[in-house]
Image (tube, grey):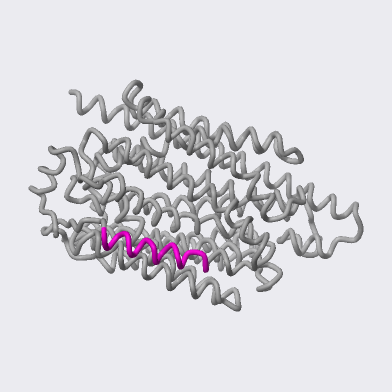
């Protein structure tokens, strides 16, 4: 049965849906599966490089294809969920995600895997928007912050636990198994969603903005492609500049389209709300720092420190464990009540930046430095992410919960793709600069394969470690600046609302 707006208000008054916590568990399972695939490929990079003869750019596109399709489609998916029903979109998303996972697991070339990952991104977009929208609908005001905190914990766990789960799978199976394992999860999720999740929608919802989705997807893909190809072709080359210009032009067209179309998937007037804008800035940069860092760290652990896939995954686990431990205790929700959203976000982003800095300065050759940085990063993510998700959803009308979830998902996915692309580009540029004239200097595996003796291999790994340090410091500065900006904007919004 479909809930109307009046029924949803009555539901909130009565304390939420009777099976709300069981439903939360179901949708968190779906959310976890989708988010694991943002980072699960990181530990498979050496295997993919060898088995599929993948270049550095191929590997980055295997990761970014999934994220970019999601970021381009989640707003349209959220609008569709509001109009046609959130349960329908959950079911559709799980089915598409399962089919895409099967295609990825059976891929025989880099191109096939990139295409399959893009297909998985379509299902992932539907799932990411509907899970948070359902949380907003089934919990009342008193429990919603705690529920969003648990949802955010699962989101963080998905990003951080990907390398661990991927490493465990690769220790016993070939790389395709990391995708095929999604299929039984998708089937279980489908059964549970059909039986448990109530249907809800906004009868007044606008029709999907397909042109907007196309423009945003093409624009972001072009910009990220320019960032990825910059180190290889040169930042001043015609290919890079033309692609970057085209991406910016398409994204500008997207903004203009959204301002004038009667049914925008993203109402640009939301950005007049300083609470919304502050949360937006923070959400992008949390994803930027965390995903970009994990992308680099899993390579560093394997290529430089010599760990296998499982060992590398285990050594990134402290980030996930810290996030889970802090969020399940409800620390973030209590601090929001006591200190306010701006202060909690500022503290969380500062800790995340400090963790990135610690990894850069202490973790070049020593895992103890990496461990300290991962724990500090986890504490920052545990504080910042739930507060920002709640700030975004509270700034958007409840009947537009799908669109609000779409905005949150878009920011996370855009930050993920941008983090991998930008920090990866910084690393590659520094690495190539330190090995002038070396064969395969644009790729660590190629440079190691062409190395002549142990001394040359050590010089190559030192260059990679230096590139890692530079890229992590760049990420730390971006996260710190974004955290301070988000806190200032949110504080101003609170003062304006109080007046």
Q: Reply above or below: 98 against 8.
A: below
Residue extending furthest toward the top: 338
Q: Quadrant of residue 166?
A: bottom right
* Residue drawn at x 32%, y 55% as measured from the top left: 129
| Rendering quarter of residue 414 | bottom left
The majority secondary structure of the magenta stretch comes to helix
**In percent of the image, x 21 and y 56: which residue is there?**
198
Range of residues picked out in magenta: 180-195
Residue 273 percent across, percent down from the top left: 25, 39
Along the line of sight, the residue nearer the viewer: 54 or 374: 374
Looking at the image, residue 144 sits to the left or right of residue 174; the answer is left
Drawn side of residue 83 relative to residue 376, left or right: left
* Residue 425 position in % (x across, y down): 61, 54
In this orientation, does residue 128 appear? yes
Q: Is residue 377 above or below residue 135?
A: above
Describe residue 101's horizontal placement relative to residue 146 as left or right: right
Q: Check the image and report above or below for 48 versus 340.
A: below
Question: Can you say which quadrant of the picture contains the C terminus?
Answer: top left
């Amino acid at each position: 049965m479909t809930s109307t707006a009046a029924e949803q208000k009555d539901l909130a008054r009565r304390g939420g849906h009777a099976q709300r916590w069981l439903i939360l568990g179901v949708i968190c399972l779906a959310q976890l599966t989708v988010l694991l695939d943002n980072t699960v490929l990181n530990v498979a990079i050496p295997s993919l490089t060898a088995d599929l003869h993948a270049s550095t750019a191929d590997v980055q596109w295997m990761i970014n294809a999934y994220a970019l399709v999601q970021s381009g489609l989640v707003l349209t998916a959220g609008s569709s969920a509001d109009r046609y029903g959130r349960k329908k979109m959950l079911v559709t998303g799980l089915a598409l995600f399962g089919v895409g996972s099967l295609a990825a697991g059976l891929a025989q070339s880099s191109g096939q895997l990139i295409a399959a990952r893009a297909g998985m991104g379509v299902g992932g977009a539907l799932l990411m928007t509907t899970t948070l929208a359902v949380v907003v609908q089934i919990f009342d005001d008193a429990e919603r912050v705690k529920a969003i905190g648990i949802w955010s914990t699962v989101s963080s766990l998905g990003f951080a636990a990907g390398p661990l789960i991927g490493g465990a799978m690769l220790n016993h199976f070939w790389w395709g198994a990391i995708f095929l394992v999604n299929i039984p999860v998708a089937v279980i999720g489908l059964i549970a969603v059909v039986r448990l999740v109530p249907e809800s929608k906004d009868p007044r919802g606008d029709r999907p903005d397909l042109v907007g989705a196309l423009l945003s997807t093409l624009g972001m893909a072009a910009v990220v492609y320019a960032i990825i190809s910059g180190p290889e072709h040169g930042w001043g080359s015609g290919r890079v500049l033309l692609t970057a210009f085209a991406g910016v032009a398409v994204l500008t067209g997207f903004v203009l389209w959204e301002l004038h179309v009667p049914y925008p998937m993203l109402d640009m007037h939301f950005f007049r709300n300083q609470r919304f804008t502050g949360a937006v800035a923070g959400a992008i940069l949390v994803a930027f720092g965390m995903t970009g860092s994990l992308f680099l760290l899993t390579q560093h652990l394997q290529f430089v420190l010599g760990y296998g896939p499982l060992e590398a995954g285990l050594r990134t686990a402290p980030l996930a464990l810290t996030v889970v431990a802090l969020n399940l205790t409800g620390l973030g929700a209590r601090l929001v009540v006591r200190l306010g959203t701006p202060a909690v976000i500022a503290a969380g982003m500062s800790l995340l930046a400090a963790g990135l800095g610690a990894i850069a300065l202490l973790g070049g050759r020593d895992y103890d430095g990496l461990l300290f940085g991962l724990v500090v990063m986890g504490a920052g993510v545990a504080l910042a992410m739930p507060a920002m998700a709640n700030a975004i959803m509270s700034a958007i009308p409840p009947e537009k919960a799908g669109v609000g979830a779409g905005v949150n998902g878009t920011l996370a996915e855009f930050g993920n793709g941008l983090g991998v692309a930008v920090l990866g580009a910084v690393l590659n540029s520094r690495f190539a600069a330190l090995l002038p004239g070396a064969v395969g200097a644009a790729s660590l595996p190629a440079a190691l394969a062409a190395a002549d003796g142990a001394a040359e291999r050590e010089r190559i790994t030192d260059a990679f470690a230096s590139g890692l340090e530079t890229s992590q410091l760049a990420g730390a500065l971006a996260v710190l600046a974004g955290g301070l900006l988000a806190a200032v904007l949110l504080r101003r919004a609170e003062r304006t609302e109080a007046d």
